[in-house]
Image: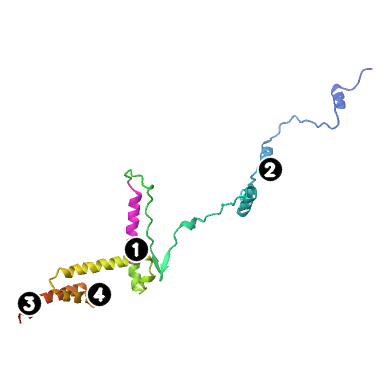
Amino acid sequence: MLCSFPPWLRILARRPAHTRCVSTRARNLSGRYWELARLNSPHPAERHVLDHEATKAAIVDQTGLKATTDVISPSASTPKDIFLGGIKIPQRPKPPESDECCMSGCAVCVYDLYFSSLDDYKKEARTARGRLRELSIPMHEWPEDLQKQEMKEVTASNEEEKEGLDNLDLDPTMKAFLMLEKQLGKSSLTEITHAAAFLERITPIIIHH
């Protein structure tokens, strides 16, 4: 007896019931690929920002070593402005390191920049010292660098005045008296010089009489 069922129906009848039907239509797997990549990634997008303390704890737990992963603030190395009596105190620029100059004759050398900054610092320091004097702020409260500059300037001024008096042919006692007058602030250098010149002129007359 000939079978009345078509061949394709007999094939389907022999296939196990749990076999899935395979589609012959193409599928776009790109979305599925990226989904699998996201799920299997050790650094998912939502975990890119790690907790700092948890990271350090994990390092200690896994290695037994102290985790030196402290975050350094960018402003930690930036020098802070110093004020004294409301006056901003300039800070001396740091000289270049020995390996910062290539010694190739650059148009703008690091030392050129340093000396330019140093000139600006000296001008600002001179202005700051003047304002500190105007406010009568005691010198011992000044920053050490400004104290040295002030003492150096006073010493240089005294030496200049002393040289000016030494050029005059006066009695040592008179020179000492005039210097004392200057130190006490009773007379300016110009007044002292004029007085010394006057005494120099009248001394022979007094002696003659």
Marks 4/1: CA–CA distance: 27 Å
Q: Say few, some or many: other residues with alpha carbon within 10 Å of mark 4 (under 14 / 14 to 19 / 20 or more).
A: few
Q: Which image quarter holds the C terminus?
A: bottom left
Q: Secondary structure at mark 3?
A: helix
Q: Residue at x 34, y 63 (%)?
A: 124
Residue bounds of the magenta highlight: 107-127
Q: CA distance from mark 4 to mark 3?
A: 28 Å
Q: Amino acid at mark 2?
A: Leu
- Looking at the image, the residue that sits furthest to the left is 208
Where is 176 relative to 111, above or below?
below
Query: Which of the numbered marks, if any, corresponds to residue 183?
Result: 4
Above or below for 89 versus 191: above
Amino acid type at circle 3 is: Pro
Residue 30 placed where, x, y %? 66, 36
Q: Of discs 3 and 1, which sits in the foreground?
A: 3
Q: CA distance from mark 2 to mark 3?
A: 111 Å
Q: Is residue 197 left or right of residue 125?
A: left
